[in-house]
Amino acid sequence: MTNINKGTKKFALIGKFGIMDLLMVIMVVGIFFTLTLSVLQTKEREKIVRESVEDMKMILIKMAEFEAEVGMTAWDISQLNIRDFKSKHFKYSITDPDTAVTAITNSLVAEEKMFYFDLREKRFRVRQDSKNIIEDNWLP
């Protein structure tokens, strides 16, 4: 065989790989990346929420210290003199000194998502419209 025939033979083998085969490969790769990115996003959101929970625990400790020192409950987060929060994604506030300390974010998704610590029941809760982004099992 000559060199021309060898090249023709290789081209013929490549020609057996059709457009349907190419579409199937693209589809499988697309499905793989979609599933992988979804899992990675969920893990990243969980990490952000867990960091925020640590911040909330620090706020609760500072609130108890403030109440013991001053004799009254803090009504604003600035009274607690907390300079550094682990999570830069959430904004914290004391919505009602007897009811809740909240954490609100816009950085996980476009609309505002929130979870809070219920001071009466002494437990974390996720606001109902935030449950699709913040899972209950991420909170202690």
Image (tube, rainbow, N blue to C red):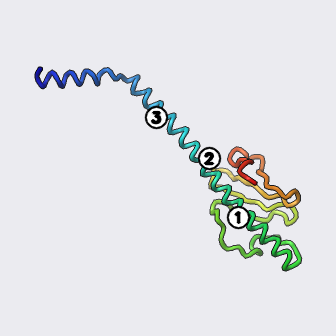
- Indicate the amino acid at tag 1: Asp
Could you say which disc has been placed on residue 29 in the image?
A: 3
Asked whether residue 129 appears in the rendered view, the answer is yes
- Label 1 neighbour load within 10 Å: few <14, some 14-19, many 20+: many
Q: CA distance from mark 3 to mark 1?
A: 39 Å
26 relative position to 37: left or right: left
Kind of element beneath mark 2: helix
Query: Percent position (x, y) of residue 44?
Result: 60, 51
User: If the image is split into quadrants, where does the C terminus sit?
Assistant: bottom right
- Indicate the amino acid at tag 2: Thr
Query: Percent position (x, y) of residue 63?
Result: 80, 70
Whether 111 is drawn above or below 97: the answer is above
Asked whether residue 130 appears in the rendered view, the answer is no
Residue occupying image coordinates x 12% and y 20%? 1
Whether 118 is drawn above or below 69: the answer is above
Residue occupying image coordinates x 65% and y 51%? 46
Residue located beneath label 2 in the image: 42
Kind of element beneath mark 1: helix
Kind of element beneath mark 3: helix
Residue found farthest to the bottom:
69
Quadrant of res 101: bottom right
Query: Percent position (x, y) of residue 71?
Result: 89, 77
- Of callouts 2 and 3, which one flags the residue occurring earlier in the amino acid sequence? 3
Residue located beneath label 1 in the image: 55
- Evaluate if marks 3 and 1 touch, with contact meaning CB atoms under 8 Å apart: no
Query: Percent position (x, y) of residue 53?
Result: 71, 59
Number of residue marks = 3
- Indicate the amino acid at tag 3: Val
Residue occupying image coordinates x 86% and y 72%? 73
